[in-house]
Image: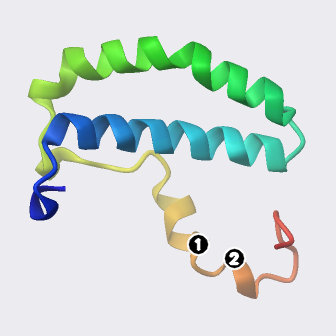
Amino acid sequence: AAALGVPQLPAALVFAHAATRDAFAAAVRLGLLGPLRAVALQASLLDAQTTHLLAVFDSLHPDTAATSAPLLDAVHAAHATLTMRLFQT
């Protein structure tokens, strides 16, 4: 974001929105939620998510960033080579 001149707070809000959207999209693909329910749930979380991010934003630093699922991130690249796939796309 900094390389593009985008302020950090809007970039963090967009990142949080995208991460939430991706989690709900996976739930829809797995058949755990319908698409309309997923949209409604994400919308219901938006205010709380924004409030929380604003509260902790000053304490966030890139050098402390971490993923919540490092093993999933590591094997994600090999998904297309698996004989059994979670998503057949």
Q: In this view, does 54 lie above or below 82?
A: above
Left or right? Give the position of 51 relative to 33: left
Q: Is mark 1 on a helix, strand or loop?
A: helix
Screen quadrant of the C terminus? bottom right
Of all residues, the one furthest to the front in this rendering is 5
Rendered position, 35 above or below 73: above
User: How far across and down, in percent of the image, does residue 70 sit?
Assistant: 45, 58
For mark 2, what is the residue?
79
Tell me which amino acid carries mark 2.
His
Q: Nearer the viewer, residue 89 or 66?
A: 89
Residue under the image location 39 percent in, 50 percent down: 67
Residue found farthest to the bottom? 81
Identify which residue, 11 or 88, lies in the foreground: 11
**Quadrant of the image occupied by residue 11:** top left
Q: Which of 83 and 33 is in front in this view?
A: 33
- Number of residues whose C-alpha sits closer than 10 Å to that of mark 2, classed few (under 14), some (14–19) or many (20 or more): few
Whether residues under marks 1 and 2 lie with C-beta atoms below 8 angstroms apart, the answer is yes
* Residue 32 pos. (x, y %): 86, 35
Residue 31 left/right relative to 27: right
Q: Is label 1 or label 2 in front?
A: 2
Would you name the residue on which mark 1 appears?
75
Question: What colouring style does the render use?
Answer: rainbow
Residue 89 has which mark? none
Q: Which residue is found at the position 12% from the left and 42% from the top? A: 61
Q: Which residue is drawn at 43% across and 12% down?
A: 48
